[in-house]
Image (tube, grey):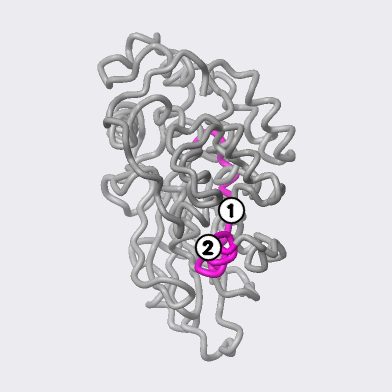
Amino acid sequence: MITSWHATTLWRHPSLSVEQSPAFAPCLLLSSMSPVASVEPLRVMQRPSDVGATLSWFQHGRHDPTTWLAATGRGPSSTGHFVRATLTPEGPGTLALHWNAHEISIESYGPGSAWLRQQARGMAGADDSAEHGLELSEHPVVAAAALANRFLRIGASNCLYHELVPTILEQRVTVEEAHRQWRQLCGALGDPAPGPFARLLLPPDPALIAQRPSWWFHKLGIERHRANALISVARHASKFWCWSAQGASEVSAKLRLILGVGEWTIGSVLGPAIGDPDAVAVGDYHLKNMIAFNLAGESRGTDDRMLELLEPYTGQRGRVVQHLARYGSAAPKRGPKRRLIQRYAR
């Protein structure tokens, strides 16, 4: 049931007056399926951005049951829409963003509607600092990658639980397998999302995961190691809202205390969860090779070598990794495609 509906214009091109803005054409922004609860004042973003690319790291696979993304074009002229169902401190909610070259508009549904509206600006990267200087880097690949991704921002959802669960599933297995398991887990335990979105699902309620034995997850292809990590994360989920408001070092220290959450998982979630531009997924099977190949021309690297090469960019290491992943060259492939079951927490 829809308990609330909100429409907000989040961003308008600075060259347009309020009268020229499509916000004054309600049919462009408002769904006829639900009544409007409130319309908030216009807030202007000063920097152009690639909204679709910025929002893409909140989606785990093209068929993520909780997060839909469709974008046409690239850069500030792109158009598209983004829909995400999630759990908030105020209850379940759905956030829908629609953008074009001139503005971003918001729709939100459910008990968590007001909280999600407050996060929308951060998710779209409006709060990300542009003062990183990577386009002036002495390394030609880093400078070129930064220039190519100059409209890419780092967004933050402030939903640690939602970022952690699919990331834990990505431990030790191929991405395709993890995405399939995420869909199955949401299908088994996730409720329908608030709003007029057929087949959109909420992430599983932490209580439903916490009360299940590890063997219950085996039918989804999730072995005991990852199942125990999911259960442990679910049992701590109520604390995550407070943790998200703290700095990256504090969040990292707390996450390390959770069973099955190691450096790779922490480095993977700090970016999308709290917008940390320095987060690096140490222990990744491919990342160290990609960094070594692009920054040093070495076909294979180690975690230590990766961190050594990224050291000059401390404070922006995660941003450099993101730029290189989108612009740089992949390291030569040698290994077979297989499950990577390891003996340590990721």
In this rendering, the answer to whether 150 lies above or below 283 is below
Q: What residue appears at the point 49 percent right and 49 percent down from the top-left corner?
A: 297
Pointers 2 and 1 in contact (CB under 8 A)? yes
Badge 2 density bin: few <14, some 14–19, many ≥20, Cα 10 Å? many
In magenta stretch: residue 149: yes
Q: Mark 2 falls on what kind of element?
A: helix
In this rendering, the answer to whether 106 lies above or below 100 is above
Disc 2 target residue: 145
Disc 1 target residue: 320
Residue 117 spot, x, y in % from top left: 57, 56
Q: Quadrant of the N terminus?
A: top left
Q: What residue appears at the point 40 percent right and 9 percent down from the top-left corner?
A: 213
Amino acid type for the residue under numbered disc 2 = Ala
- Left or right of residue 110, residue 244 in this image: right
In magenta stretch: residue 153: yes
Q: Say which mark, if any, is on residue 202.
A: none
Q: What residue appears at the point 62 percent right and 44 percent down from the top-left corner?
A: 309
Q: What residue appears at the point 44 percent right and 13 percent down from the top-left corner?
A: 211
Is any atom of residue 196 visible in this view? Answer: yes
Residue 295 spot, x, y in % from top left: 55, 51
Front in this rendered view, residue 282 or 225: 282
Residue 197 spot, x, y in % from top left: 31, 52
Residue 222 spot, x, y in % from top left: 33, 19
Q: Mark 1 falls on what kind of element?
A: helix
Region in magenta: 140-163
Amino acid type for the residue under numbered disc 1 = Val
Front in this rendered view, residue 157 or 86: 157
Front in this rendered view, residue 276 or 282: 282
